[in-house]
Image (tube, coloured by chain):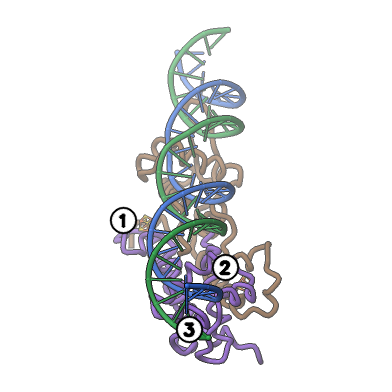
Chain colours: A purple, B brown, C blue, D green
Amino acid sequence: MMELTRKGEYAIRGIVHLARLPHGNVALLSEIAEAAELPQTFLAKIFQNFAKLGFVNSYRGTGGGFSLARPAAAITLRQVVEAVEGPIAPNRCVTELGCERSATCRVHTVWRRVQEQVVGILDGVTIEELAREED
Amino acid sequence: MMELTRKGEYAIRGIVHLARLPHGNVALLSEIAEAAELPQTFLAKIFQNFAKLGFVNSYRGTGGGFSLARPAAAITLRQVVEAVEGPIAPNRCVTELGCERSATCRVHTVWRRVQEQVVGILDGVTIEELAREED
DNA sequence: ACCTTTAGGATCATTTTTATCCTTTTTAGT
DNA sequence: ACTAAAAAGGATAAAAATGATCCTAAAGGT
Ligand code: SF4
Ligand code: SF4
């Protein structure tokens, strides 16, 4: 239940790989895909989206590739996950869809707590932390 | 992301409805489905499974139906959710499948924390609490 | 010009979700 | 025994989501 999709997993592995490079360093998509063992064409879509969202810069042509657009410490795991999977919500009543029963529903409050906890954890983790190799 | 399926939602609404009845009371599937506004044939599958798992007793024939097999306070939300959705796991590395990277992966520890928190919350909620109408 | 590399769009196979239907079995009541 | 009621079990299926792949276009470097 409540499992991240492959897309989400790939997105994280991809951006964490980028964050391990010296800052501003440009990496080829093919390089990232190979290093992180991800399907390249699928990762392409994910990174195109990241570029639009301003997580990464993309450069076309020879010598092109992707680089982090902001410091890894300024990108949270929540931002990355939500970018690819949408808002974190354990049930639709805690999304913008809502539920007409939510005012009196006791289960609703549980899902709100779950949402808060998960969001809290993912908000507290940055890509920089995830990219650290020492320690 | 990480959203409960309709099946999970129906399962909870169904069993909570049963729990609101005087204990041991037998209710028709059609009655539960109507009261909780659930598709009856779909709910049937869910309750067949609940019966196998020992959450409810089922009685066939005239005067049949379903009743709670144990006190509502002895059934947790986690048990219900896991019965229909499988083990709670935000990523496959925290399932029995595992991941060969998990030993060194910093993201893995985040998913473990998420899993622990969610499991903890759902473990701490019983169907009895969810069924309360007063307060 | 030509090669490299990302962007964008279309497409597609597989799996999961969300059901419905039909037949069988069990049980109660007559 | 007969009949009606109700769940059990199994098959089927439409729709949506997932997980990709492919092709053409655009941009940039040499
Ligand atoms: S948990 Fe309650 S509020 Fe949320 S979707 Fe279910 S019925 Fe609605
Ligand atoms: S988060 Fe780390 S351990 Fe978990 S699946 Fe991804 S790579 Fe594997």
Position of A28 relative to D2 (above/below): below
The disc numbered 1 marks a residue on which chain? Answer: A
Which one is earlier in the sequence, the residue at label 3 or at label 2?
A: 2
Split into 4 quadrants, where in the image is the N terminus of chain B?
A: bottom left
| Along the line of sight, the residue nearer the viewer: A117 or A35 | A35
Between residue B35 and residue D20, name the one nearer to us: D20
- The amino acid type found where label 3 is placed reads Gly
Q: Amino acid at mark 2?
A: Gln
x and y percentages locating residue B24 in the rendered image: 49, 43
Q: Position of residue A87 (x, y in %)?
A: 40, 68
What residue is pinned by disc 1?
A: A101
| Left or right for C7, reference A28 | left
Q: Residues within 10 Å of mark 2 (few under 14, many from 20)?
A: some
**Is residue A71 rendered to the left or right of residue B111?**
left
Task: Give the residue displayed 58% in from the left and 88% down from the top.
Answer: A21
Is B70 positioned to the left or the right of B21 in the image?
Answer: right
Mark identifier at residue B12: none
Q: Cβ of disc 1 within 8 Å of ligand 1?
A: yes
- Name the image quarter holding residue B29: top left
**Label disc, if present, on residue A40 of the rendered structure:** 2
Proximity of marks 1 and 2: CB atoms separated by less than 8 Å: no
Q: CA distance from mark 1 to mark 2?
A: 44 Å
What residue lies at 52% left-to-right and 91% top-to-bottom?
A23
Same chain shared by disc 3 and disc 1: yes
Looking at the rendered structure, the secondary structure element under dot 3 is loop
Mark 1 vs 2, N-terminal side: 2
Residue B22 shows in the view: no
Give the mark, 3 or 1, whose residue is nearer the N terminus. Answer: 1
